[in-house]
């Protein structure tokens, strides 16, 4: 496939992907919480990587710690995440998913469809091809947002 054919194919595909993502239904238990994609990203890190410091989450999400603090405060009020002081440094806050099994189950089911789709898409690729794909998507996101490196 030529570069121009690949660009054309991606320009047609990406709006369909975006529409499909927008139509992803939020589980019933979470609907009243008005969760946004940014919340899903934060929750993904907590599901896959476990509890984390606010600054760690900010670095992973590539946003300011104050942004993460606001999201965490919102999710904490709604019972989705819990905040605890770091025993080694009481000034730092450790964020974790709630222990409530119903809410945790809803979060896991919300993430499962996307994780399953990525697993099927990435499984046939070699580790090097997967890394190249991720770098390509990061470069596209950066370019589409107007950020240059």
Image (tube, grey):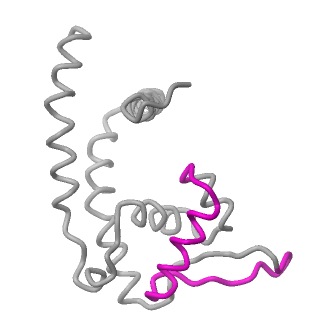
Say which of 115 and 7 sits in front. Answer: 7
- Where is residue 28 drawn, in percent x and y? 22, 83
Q: At 14% across and 42% down in the image, what residue appears?
A: 16
Image check: 133 left or right of 4? right
Q: Is residue 86 left or right of residue 41?
A: right
**Residue 73 in the image, given as x and y percentages of width and height:** 55, 79
Q: Quadrant of the N terminus?
A: top left
**Residue 133, x across and y down, in percent:** 39, 31
Check if residue 130 falls in the magenta segment: no
Q: Residue furthest right?
A: 88
* Residue drawn 28% across the image and 84% down it: 32
Taking 142 as reference, is 99 above or below it? below
Quarter of the picture holding the C terminus: top right
Query: Is 146 drawn above or below residue 114 in the view shown?
Result: above
**Is residue 28 positioned above or below 15 on the image?**
below
Number of callouts in the render? 0
Q: Is residue 135 left or right of residue 65?
A: left
Residue interval drawn in magenta: 61-90
Residue 77 drawn at (x, y percent): 49, 88
Residue shown at the point (82%, 81%) measured from the top left: 87
> In the image, what residue occupies the spot 24% across and 77% down?
27
């Amino acid at each position: 496939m030529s570069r121009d054919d690949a660009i054309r194919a991606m320009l047609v595909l990406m709006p369909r992907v975006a529409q499909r993502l927008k139509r992803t239904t939020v589980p019933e238990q979470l609907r009243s919480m008005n969760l946004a994609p940014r919340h899903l990203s934060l929750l993904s890190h907590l599901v896959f990587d476990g509890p984390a410091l606010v600054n760690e989450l900010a670095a992973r999400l590539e946003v300011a710690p104050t942004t993460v603090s606001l999201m965490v405060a919102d999710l904490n009020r709604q019972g989705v995440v819990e905040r605890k002081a770091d025993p080694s440094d009481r000034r730092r806050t450790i964020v974790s998913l709630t222990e409530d099994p119903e809410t945790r189950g809803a979060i896991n089911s919300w993430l499962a469809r996307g994780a399953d789709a990525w697993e099927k898409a990435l499984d046939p690729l070699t580790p090097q091809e997967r890394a190249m794909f991720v770098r390509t998507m990061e470069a596209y996101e950066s370019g589409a947002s107007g950020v240059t490196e």
